[in-house]
């Protein structure tokens, strides 16, 4: 696929868009960008956006305010897009609307994505789904608000152009978007760098609790529901922890486990060089990218950590 317009041939009256569960900056950035782009350039088409609530800092993006947090199952869409969704079971909010649609489109950049839609445009080399979308949109049809959403997606998934997924092409896309004139400096600070006081406190606590395994090649930490309550935070406040663990000298893999519901855990994995965390996550039904992936686990935090560590140990180079 070369551009979004290819999909709009024929009678397209209603389009649905959804992101993934527990949406991050790339998810909110790419879905709101697509929503705004379709509405601006194809005003005759009715577009609905389905999103779970993200952390506060992402709710100010244009388009987010019009998103729906519940699905009306009666709607039949001519076209239904998912952005940044790595597998069918990770679509947030939309429920059966995806299956019911006449045609489905998956736009993504996860290497583990099996291609679950009718049309699958998956670019594993791209930094972000927002970068994939930038390439599918005509530059002259991107206004400042759309550019701001796309740029947000790119900076979140590339760690503001720091991670290994940042390519010269990522920078070119970002440069084109910057020319649309939004305040990039403020955007990076407000949506990526800034932490609430509580977010900083839980980060400090999780780092304090962290332990090393396998001669420091792996760094692990976890947070229980009880601890989240004590620090008055939710899972949306924990996204910095695994990124900081990864930066530990000598660590190849960072593991962060947090409790979603009693006995149900989310596992976030990051790696620095050779280790493919999406492969390790896939053993537990998860997925993601080579250097950033996740999965779920049941039992106690110690049991979940023990299972993931034994899988990681098999793959460490020594
Ligand atoms: P995070 O650790 O930030 O939640 O996720 C890292 C990456 O792995 C993201 O790109 C995310 O979409 C993917 N990911 C996280 N958890 C899962 C999961 O349970 N299943 C799959 N397929 N991908 C996941
Ligand atoms: Mn992404």
Image (spheres, helix red, strand yellow):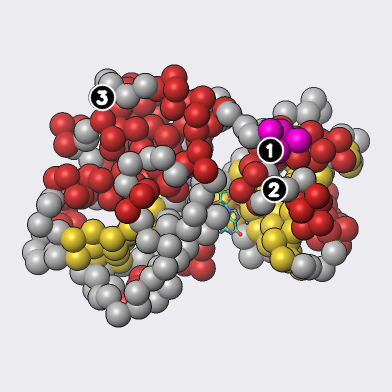
Q: Which residue is mark 3?
A: 180
Circles 2 and 1: CB distance less than 8 Å?
A: yes
Indicate which disc, 2 or 1, sits on the residue closer to the N terminus. 1
Nearest-to-viewer mark from 1 and 3: 1
Q: Is residue 22 above or below residue 56?
A: below
Name the residue at 51% across, 68% down. 89
Does residue 226 belong to the magenta stretch?
Answer: no
> Gap between marks 1 and 3, in whole Å?
32 Å
Q: Secondary structure at mark 3?
A: loop
Indicate which disc, 2 or 3, sits on the residue closer to the N terminus. 3
Name the residue at 15% across, 31% down. 140
Magenta span main SS: helix
Q: Secondary structure at mark 1?
A: helix
Task: Decide which of 230, 142 is in the foreground and name it.
Answer: 230
- Asked whether the viewer can see residue 315, the reply is no
Nearest-to-viewer mark from 2 and 3: 2
Q: Which residue is mark 1?
A: 199
Return the x and y of residue 139 as percentages of the image width and height.
Answer: 20, 32
Name the residue at 66% across, 58% down. 295
Does residue 199 belong to the magenta stretch?
Answer: yes
Return the x and y of residue 306 as percentages of the image width and height.
Answer: 86, 57
Q: Is residue 205 above or below residue 175?
A: below
Q: Is residue 84 above or below residue 213?
A: below
The quadrant the C terminus occupies is top right
Q: Residues within 10 Å of mark 1 (few under 14, many from 20)?
A: many
Task: Decide which of 157, 285 is in the foreground and name it.
Answer: 157
Compared across the picture, whether 208 is left or right of 86 comes to right
């Amino acid at each position: 696929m070369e551009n979004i317009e290819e999909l709009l041939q024929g009678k397209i009256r209603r389009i649905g868009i959804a992101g993934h569960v527990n949406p991050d900056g790339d998810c909110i950035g790419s879905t709101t960008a697509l929503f705004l782009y379709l509405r601006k350039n194809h005003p005759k088409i009715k577009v609905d956006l389905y999103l779970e609530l993200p952390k506060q800092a992402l709710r100010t993006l244009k388009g987010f305010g019009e998103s729906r947090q519940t699905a009306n199952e009666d709607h039949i869409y001519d076209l239904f897009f998912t952005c940044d969704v790595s597998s069918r079971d990770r679509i947030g909010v939309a429920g059966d609307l995806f299956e019911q649609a006449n045609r489905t489109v998956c736009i993504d950049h996860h290497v583990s994505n099996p291609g679950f839609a009718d049309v699958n445009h998956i670019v594993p080399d791209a930094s972000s789904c927002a970068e994939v979308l930038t390439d599918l949109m005509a530059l002259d049809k991107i206004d400042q608000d759309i550019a701001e959403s796309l740029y947000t997606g790119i900076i979140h998934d590339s760690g503001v152009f720091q991670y290994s997924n940042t390519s010269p092409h990522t920078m070119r896309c970002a440069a084109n978007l910057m020319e649309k004139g939004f305040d990039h400096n403020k955007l990076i600070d407000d949506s990526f760098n800034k932490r609430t006081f509580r977010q900083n406190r839980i980060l400090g606590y999780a780092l304090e609790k962290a332990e090393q395994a396998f001669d420091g090649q792996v760094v692990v930490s976890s947070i229980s529901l009880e601890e989240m309550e004590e620090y008055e935070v939710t899972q949306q406040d924990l996204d910095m922890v695994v990124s900081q663990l990864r930066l530990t000298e000598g660590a190849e893999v960072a593991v962060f486990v947090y409790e979603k519901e009693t006995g149900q855990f989310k596992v976030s994995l990051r790696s620095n060089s050779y280790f493919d965390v999406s492969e390790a996550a896939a053993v537990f039904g998860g997925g993601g990218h080579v250097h950033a992936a996740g999965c779920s686990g049941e039992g106690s935090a110690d049991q979940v950590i023990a299972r993931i560590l034994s899988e990681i140990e098999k793959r460490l180079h020594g």
